[in-house]
Amino acid sequence: MVRDAIYLLQDISEYARAIYQWKTLRRPGKGVDYTAEDYRDSVRRAVERLHPEKMRLRVAEIITETPTTKTFRFSRVDGALPPFRAGQYVNLFVEVDGVKTSRPYSISSPPDSDFLDLTVRAKPNGFVSTYLLFNAKAGDEFTSTGPQGTFYYEPLIDGKELVFLAGGSGVTPFMSIIRQASASNWPFKVTLLYGSRVPDDIIFGDELNKLSKNSDKFKCALVISEPPEGYSGLVGFLTSELIKEVVGDIKNKTFYICGPNVMYDFCLAELEKLNVPSYKVKRELYGPPDDVTKERGWPKNLSPEIVFSVEVVGYKTIKTKAGEPLMNSLERNGIVVEASCRSGACSVCRTKLLSGKVFMPEHTAVRESDRANNYIHPCVSYPLEDLKIQI
């Protein structure tokens, strides 16, 4: 009985001491006062270092990869480069002929580099790619987002045998993963099937061949769709037959796809022929389609050249073509919408559709709550009639 009373008094005494410390020092025991201003500032600074919303980048070097492709090697001028996952991207902001816009580019350098490589390939009628390839020079500065995206290796889910299906500049996120894996003594096996139109368009070709020769954990198969006369390598497209020939048994392998939009439907159908389960397929979205009229569900007989009016509440009314992403028209008219992926996945650009109808490709990742409340992604939204929107 006496012992219980002593313990009770000790508990009360400890409680009183804790209350005294809390009132006077705001640091009970050895804990931390999470409400303190200095603590909140230190947390904010740490988060900004690890996950910067924006970065200021300077072109340190420009490397010519192919006649149509260059790598822009950036250093960061407003801090240290943040950590990222191999396979992620940044959205690069540019101003071209007075138009403020942006484009997402996958990082091709590995995460442990002192620099950030963005590899840009010429695109027919390309707006930003043309500007970068023919106008950007060493010393130029740009703003970008911090690293973003979910197209990266997950060891607990993806297993130890990976198959990369790349098309054109879609090889860039794979290059970051491959370079990191090579520097880490290949913690998993990789088979890369890389499709290009002609041999001169193969990006990182020499490096890929060298890596393939130096490790039995990396295999590279280059596939040319328009081979020159006398070409002796693999030709055609990434069909199920070709994948089976190069990869062999597909059991327990995880497939990644990155390339032009037209490549996705084709490769997904070919993987279905091989009975690859959908949960073993990962894909990186690749911007708006080059020709939206070829997308499934595009209204028949609707010309992409027809012009509609778009009233932007609080701004002005603009004109836009049916076959052009709404965001492009907004930017050309001086209306900048916050954006990140420009592929219909991240929802950063979500905009309220007050009236009218738009077409969005099937891959657009609009949340069900947004669909129910008439929100659209203007980066991949195409007007089907006059619109009224609110940014």
Image (spheres, rainbow, N blue to C red):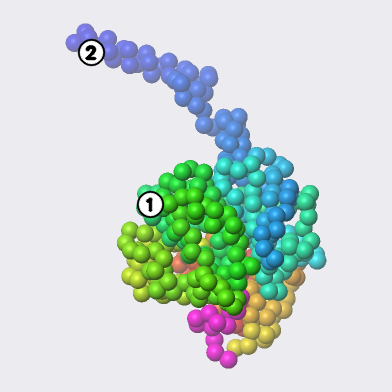
Q: Residue placed farthest to the front in the image?
A: 230
Is residue 201 rendered to the left or right of residue 270? right
What x and y, as percent, mark residue 142?
73, 53
Name which quarter of the figure residue 208 lies in.
bottom right
Residue shown at 67%/53% (left/top)? 144
Residue shown at 35%/67% (left/top)? 276
Q: Residues within 10 Å of mark 1 (few under 14, many from 20)?
A: some
Q: Quadrant of the N terminus?
A: top left
Q: CA distance from mark 2 to mark 1?
A: 59 Å
**What amino acid type should be assigned to the residue bearing mark 2?**
Asp
Name which quarter of the figure residue 331 lies in.
bottom right
Q: What's the magenta region?
A: 290-301
Residue highlighted by disc 1: 160
Q: Residue placed farthest to the top in the image?
A: 2
Q: Earlier in the sequence, mark 2 or mark 1?
A: 2
Is residue 387 rendered to the left or right of residue 84? right
Closer to the camera in the image, 256 or 179: 179
Placement of 168 over or under 206, stated as above or below: below
Placement of 264 over or under 118, stated as above or below: below
Give the structural element (helix, strand or loop) at label 2. helix
Q: Residues within 10 Å of mark 2 (few under 14, many from 20)?
A: few
What x and y, as percent, mark residue 381?
59, 73
Residue highlighted by disc 2: 4
